[in-house]
Image (cartoon, helix red, strand yellow):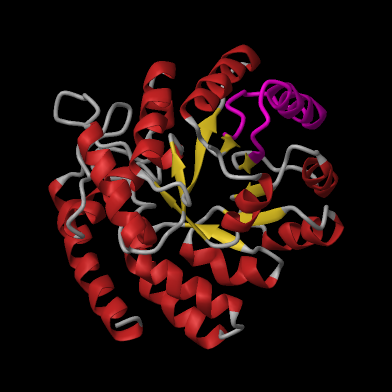
Amino acid sequence: MPLPRETVRDRLRGVAVGLLTPFDEDGAIRHDHLRENARDLFEQGPRTFLVTANISEYHSLSQAERVEVAQTSVGALPDEACVLAGVGGSTGDARDLVEGYDGVGVDAMMVMPPDHTYVHEQGLLDYYRELAAVTDRPLVPYVRGFDPSVDYLVDLADLDPVVGVKYALEDTIKLGAAVERGADDVVWVHGLAEPFAVAAWAEGAEGFTAGVSNFRPEVGLALFDALSAGEWARARRLRNACLPYQNLREGTGRDNTLTGAVSVPVVKKGLELAGLHGGSVREPIRPLDPDTERSAEERYRRLDAGIERLVG
């Protein structure tokens, strides 16, 4: 049975860990590795999991594969875990995907950022209403890739099916304005991982999505505890320990000028270094070049030392 709405809202007040999709060298999904990662991460403490998300290579998965990945994840995790699955695309495709996720027991729908070139704020609100009409599961819209008005964010938080908003913009002042004016019972989750968690928390965020905590969740859990307790100096130290590895995700890799191109394989490398399953990637993402891989290994050693010093 899916978790009650109030429980989903409560689970968003924490660290949401992404379950990356492990592929073999031929691009096939390793469901056994996905299952093992989910169980291992749950045992380390996280209770909220994002499947078929951006970091899970959502856009490289077919509709059927998305549902299969969600089913594997739900089946691997205990009932107390909260599983959010990514939904996007045209209204018809998104509604079909919502119904597929309903059938495999996900707890909430994380509605992906719009992938249209031209976006209308009121049209986006209509889109969320259309998706809500085919499910009783709550929605968590993912705000990224466009610059919405505060009025839009307030209207978004006021939608009845919305229990949380994943806000993945660097403008934390706008976040604070939306929190101030938005619905009191909506949980604002900052979606840019550990580097922005401290600033976002000061503006009213109550949770954040994982970066390095996708493979070393103890640092994210410690950061959440520090923020919740108002231990700002400790929170900054934990944030700073994450920065070298997290910053590597913004790299271009070889023969490329686009930033962030190595983000997913860098996290997958972190999974491997932490004893979990990373696996290969699908196009248009490329595997790490040797220089970036060596840098990931060196930065992971620094991260490991920092976690040992700060968390134990």
Magenta range is: 112-140
Residue at 86% in and 57% down = 181
Q: Position of residue 104 (x, y in %)?
A: 46, 27
Question: Looking at the image, which residue is at 68% across and 20% down?
Answer: 134
- Residue 249 visible in the picture: yes
Q: Residue at x 24, y 45 (%)?
A: 36
In the rendered view, tell whether residue 135 sits above or below residue 76: above
The quarter of the picture where the C terminus appears is bottom left
Q: Nearer the viewer, residue 209 or 113?
A: 209
Residue 101 horizontal/vertical position (percent):
51, 26
Task: Examine the rendered structure and indicate whether residue 5 appears above or below residue 311.
Answer: above
- Left or right: where 183 falls relative to 92: right
Left or right, 136 with respect to 260, comes to right
Q: Quadrant of residue 241?
A: bottom left
Residue 212 location, quadrant = bottom left
Q: Residue at x 46, y 50 (%)?
A: 81
Image position, residue 272 (x, y; %): 18, 52
